[in-house]
Amino acid sequence: PCLRSEAATDWDADFTYDYETLRVGGLIFAGVVVFLSFVLLLGNRVRNCGKTKVSLLMCKSHVDL
């Protein structure tokens, strides 16, 4: 196999994208965003699972008594 050396790199050449790395990085970023959105949307529901919610009207009526 041919190993790249510092002398073989042409620093004056036009810039080219490494599309493989760019694609993998984009997929990882998208996966993290989707995962975090699921955590934000479902996190409160999982934490409050099984708890009954008291309405605001019932709280006010008990305070007046």
Image: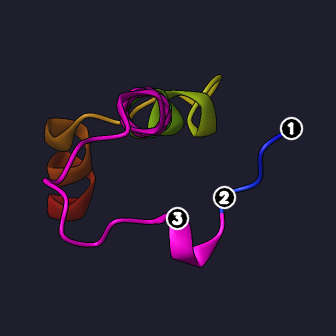
Q: Which residue is mark 2?
A: 4
Q: From which residue to which does the magenta span run?
A: 5-32
Quadrant of image for the C terminus: bottom left
Q: Earlier in the sequence, mark 1 or mark 3?
A: 1
| Picture coordinates of residue 4, whole percent (x, y) | 66, 58
Identify the secondary structure beneath mark 3. Answer: helix
Q: Residue 1's mark?
A: 1
Residue 40 is one of the magenta-drawn residues: no
Labels 2 and 1 touching (C-beta < 8 A): no
| Picture coordinates of residue 41, whole percent (x, y) | 37, 30
- Residue 29 lies, with reference to residue 7, above or below; the image says above
Labels 2 and 3 touching (C-beta < 8 A): yes
Q: Residues within 10 Å of mark 3 (few under 14, many from 20)?
A: few
Q: Is residue 17 visible?
A: yes
Q: Residue at x 65, y 23 (%)?
A: 50
Distance, label 2 to label 1, CA atoms, is: 10 Å
Q: Amino acid at mark 2?
A: Arg
Q: Amino acid at mark 3?
A: Ala
Q: Residues within 10 Å of mark 2 (few under 14, many from 20)?
A: few
Identify the secondary structure beneath mark 1. Answer: loop
62 sits left or right of 15 in the view = right
